[in-house]
Image (cartoon, rainbow, N blue to C red):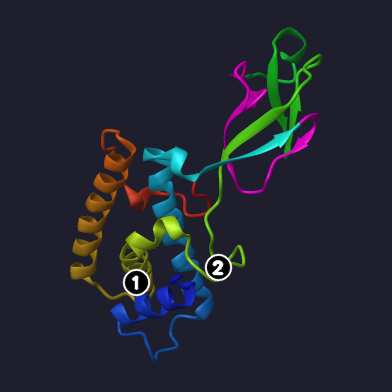
Amino acid sequence: MPISLASIKANAKSLIDETNGDYITSTDWDAYVDAAIRELWRMYATNAPDSITTSATFTASPFSIPANVGLRFVQKDPGTTGFYNLSPTSLAGAPHQEGYYRVGDSLYLTPGLTGSFALFYLRAPQTNASGATNLDTILEQFVEYIEVRAALKGASKRDITKPELRERLAQLTQEIEETITRDAGLPTQIIDVDNFDSRLWY
């Protein structure tokens, strides 16, 4: 059964006894939940990017890059035995090197390139700000992290301390890192979630 973002917000509020309070606005709580989702998404982007990678195919440039995504690579002739990854270049280098370059929100191929292409990118997570109502399926197993992290942001807003929640957050962060990297077959990377730029997840 899908986990709704509204239920995550309600659980986060209950962790700091804010269930019936109105000190923190609903808009603020939505932002706290979204920030926690992006932090968790960042762990996937760092340790297991293939799990949140998707692609879009195109045959000519310029190609409009989807909004709020993290670019990974561009592939020529995807799905064929002769596929290969193109090298990123620049507008100045385009006449001299086969590849692709970005100008604003558009992707350009260097002159002379023909065929089919695929842009592989890290998709953005489902959040309140994106208009979603449910949590991404891949994050459901770690929903407690989002609730605790959002609750701590609410506690900070109210100038109250919740050491037990910060301790639980540290435990959850370690467990999540170990789970993600184990599933991806990679060594664990230490992530300091307190230093994330919550405006972007990638």
Residue at 43% of width from left, 85% of height from top? 23
Residue at 74% of width from left, 15% of height from top? 94
Classify 60 as above or below 43: above
Q: Residue 136: percent from the left, percent from the top? A: 48, 60
Q: Residue 27: percent from the left, percent from the top? A: 54, 75
Label at residue 44: none
Label at residue 151: 1
Look at discs 1 and 2 and give the one toward the viewer: 2
The part of the chain drawn in magenta is: 59-84
- Toward the front, the furthest residue is 81
- Given the image, on which type of amino acid does mark 1 rest? Ala
Residue at 22% of width from left, 56% of height from top? 170
- Please tell me in which quadrant of the rendered image residue 150 appears: bottom left
Residue at 23% of width from left, 72% of height from top? 162
Q: Where does label 2 land, which residue?
A: 128
Give the structural element (helix, strand or loop) at label 1.
helix
User: In the rendered structure, does residue 194 fall within the stretch colored magenta?
Assistant: no
- Given the image, on which type of amino acid does mark 2 rest? Asn
Classify 52 as above or below 85: below
Taken as a whole, is the magenta stretch helix, strand or loop? Answer: loop
User: In the rendered structure, does residue 82 fall within the stretch colored magenta?
Assistant: yes
Q: Nearer the viewer, residue 111 or 116?
A: 116
- Please tell me in which quadrant of the rendered image residue 122 appears: top right
Say left or right for 192 vs 66. Answer: left
Q: Nearer the viewer, residue 97 or 196?
A: 97
- Please tell me in which quadrant of the rendered image residue 167 appears: bottom left
Say left or right for 8 vs 106. Answer: left
